[in-house]
Amino acid sequence: MKKVLVGALASVMAISSLSCITVAAAEKPFEGETITVLVDTDFTRIGFDAVCEAAKEKLGLEVEVETRVNGSEGDNVVKTRLVAGEMTDICYYNSGSLLKALNPADYFLDLSDQEFMSKLEDTYLSTVTVDGAAYGIPFESAAVGGIFYNREKYEEYGLSVPKTWDEFLVNCDKLKEAGETAVIGTYADSWTSQIPYLFDNYNLVAEEPDFLDNFEAGTAKWAETEAGIKSFQKIADISKYFNEDYTASTYDDGVDKIAMGDGIHLFMFSSFLPNLYDLYGNEVGDNIGYFAIPGDDPENVGATLNITSSFYANKNSENLDAVLAFMEFYLSDEGLDAFSSVQQPNGPYFVKGYELPDTVFRCIKEDIQPYFDEGKTYPAAEFLVSVKGTDCAAICQELGTGQITAEEAAAAYDRDCYKQAMQLGLGWKEE
């Protein structure tokens, strides 16, 4: 009997010991494994590094980062390494039309059947899905375009957030009559002139759902589409409310003007918020609110988004299990918390159900997040079509300074896009 008890005790101890080893292995299933990630020189690492540290703590996984140059030269590096079979385990690259140009099915893993992909917002998924296959996960939060405004001034003049474009113009008229600069113009930095047009895409698609597909095919034009002309018309509409020095004012001047209350509305995207808070502090930053560029339908007001670049899994990686585990962790609450703890998000994340931390900027949590909760978001056109004319900023500046009409601007942009379509070999018919 004693031998039996001793034997049984030994067996229990052996099972217990084995269980401890199994639990320890399960806690860090990728201990000692390393995956590689290729990023560009503009890649902001602080939030990403925090996620990598958290992943190492939980999974035992090391992440090694390689850097490539930015711009067209960097694009060539990516394409060359993909063709040569020398890509890292994970590739950081654009979402949207530039992804499609890479022929992703040849190089990247289709993530559609991964459970963690069901957490992602449809707005984001539309920019990393090609021929029904979803390839990417978002690097960071959304950057939301629209109209940022001074809350105190709105309260002072008894204004409400407009639900239509006409209501917005009425607000601007009241502000102008009171001696205020209703809209801040920053045309010394030409790229800012495009923002009212670029971030009106939600309204364009709401009115003309097939326009972007037809435009890509070369069968539709901005100048022949009422909703398309409206997007350009908004630039003309706001020009009469600009600050007198708008042609000499820079982006930095615009941030200063809205912070100091020297202008009430600034057409911008939410990536400017960290700069605003860093320069002027929480009290000033919290005084800036946001609303999407409204259209004609008060029941359908939505925000147009800049889509973050994404991470793509190399389908030929020898470490796919580790790559997928890292991607799943990256999208988890734990991963997003790690990111947010060191790097303020520019907007809501594209992950359903994730609650933004209390430290997030006020207008993101109070004003922008509701658009995501209600499903009222859509990507900017450049993430959905491959053609964006190179002269867009110059055309928008001419429009905003009164040199051309909205119809003429739309026609000029059509001609600009036609040139690029020819360069891309899209086979558009001759004009």
Image (cartoon, helix red, strand yellow):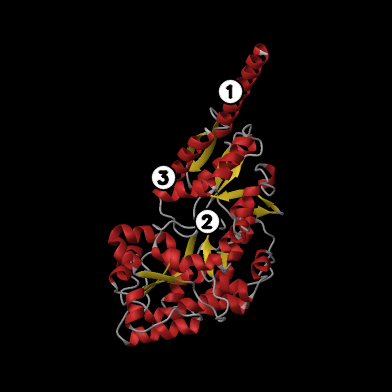
The reply to whether the C-beta atoms of the residues labelled 3 and 1 are less than 8 Å apart is no
Which mark is drawn over residue 17? Answer: 1
Give the labeled residue for mark 2: 354
Mark positioned earlier in the residue sequence (3 or 2): 3
Residue 213 in percent (x, y) is at 67, 66
Spatial CA distance of label 3 from label 1 is 40 Å
Count neighbours of disc 2 (C-alpha within 10 A) and say few if under 14, some if 14 to 19, many if 20 or more: some
User: Which mark is drawn over residue 46?
Assistant: 3
Q: Give the mark nearer the N terminus: 3 vs 1.
A: 1
Amino acid type of the residue tagged 1 in the rendering: Ser
Whether residue 39 sits left or right of residue 12 in the image: it is left
Q: Position of residue 40 (x, y in %)?
A: 48, 44
Q: In front here: 156 or 227?
A: 156
In this view, which residue lies farthest toward the front? Answer: 1
User: What's the distance in space between the residues labelled 2 and 1, CA to CA?
Assistant: 38 Å
Dot 3 amino acid type: Ile
Towards the viewer: 352 or 303 = 352
Which of pointers 3 and 2 indicates the residue nearer the eye?
Answer: 2
**Quarter of the rendering occupied by the N terminus:** top right
Count the numbered circles shown. Answer: 3
Q: Name which of mark 2 and mark 1 comes first in the sequence.
A: 1
* 10 Å crowding of disc 3: few (<14), some (14-19), many (20+): some
User: Where does residue 290 sit, x and y in percent of width and height?
Assistant: 43, 70
Question: Which quadrant holds residue 225?
Answer: bottom right
Query: Which residue is at the front of the view, 3 or 129?
Result: 3
Residue 177 seen in this snapshot: yes
SS label for mark 3: helix
Q: Are the residues tagged 2 and 1 within 8 Å (C-beta)? A: no
Left or right of 244: which side holds 220?
A: right
Q: Nearer the viewer, mark 3 or mark 1?
A: 1
